[in-house]
Amino acid sequence: MATFQAKNADRAGVVIILQFAKVKTYGDSISVSNCYEVARLFIDEDIDDVASFKKRYCKLICFYHIPYNSCHINHS
């Protein structure tokens, strides 16, 4: 994640998908751990579902006139 942030410091609207993980809470702390040694992490991957989500999200942002510098996706 740190490598991704260093290479994409000016980028907003990153989609992160974490599969097969457990979220634990203890008091005010939240932690994430792998589940059955098969956790998968996708950071802004070129996946059809991610592209579709970004298009819908950007349309929503544009509809409500919320400033968002990452809506450079073609809305067609």
Image: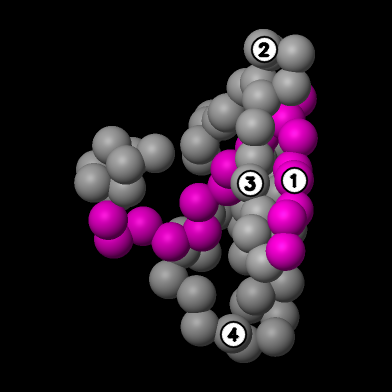
Residue 32 lies in quadrant = top right
Q: From the viewer's perspective, is the residue at label 3 or at label 4 nearer?
A: 3
Q: Which residues are magenta?
A: 9-27
Label 2 near label 3: C-beta < 8 Å? no
Is 66 drawn above or below residue 71 in the view shown? below
Q: Which type of secondary structure does the marked residue at label 2 adopt?
A: loop
Per the image, the residue denoted by label 1 is 24
Q: Is residue 23 left or right of residue 69?
A: right
Residue 41 at x, y percent in the picture: 58, 28
Most distant residue in the left direction: 6
Q: Is residue 70 left or right of residue 5?
A: right
Contact, mark 2 vs mark 1 (Cβ under 8 Å): no
Residue to which mark 4 is pinned: 66
Residue drawn at 58 percent across, 43 percent down = 16
Lower position in the chain sequence, tag 2 or tag 1:
1
Question: Rounded to the nearest whole Å, what is the CA distance between mark 2 and mark 4?
Answer: 40 Å
User: For the residues marked 3 and 1, what is the alpha-carbon distance in whole angstroms?
Assistant: 5 Å
For the residues marked 3 and 4, what is the alpha-carbon distance in whole angstroms?
31 Å
Helix, strand, or loop for circle 3?
A: strand
Residue at x 74%, y 53% (from the top left corner): 25
Q: Are marks 3 and 4 in contact (CB under 8 Å)?
A: no
Are discs 3 and 1 less than 8 Å apart at CB? yes
Q: Give the answer, above or below, for where 33 lies relative to 59.
A: above
The 10 Å Cα crowd at callout 4, few under 14, some 14 to 19, many 20 or more, is few
| 17 falls in the magenta region | yes
How did the renderer colour the structure?
Answer: one colour
Residue 62 placement, left or right of 46 = right
- N-term mark: 3 or 2: 3
Q: Which residue is mark 3?
A: 31
Nearer the observer, disc 2 or disc 1? 1
Residue 37 tag number:
2
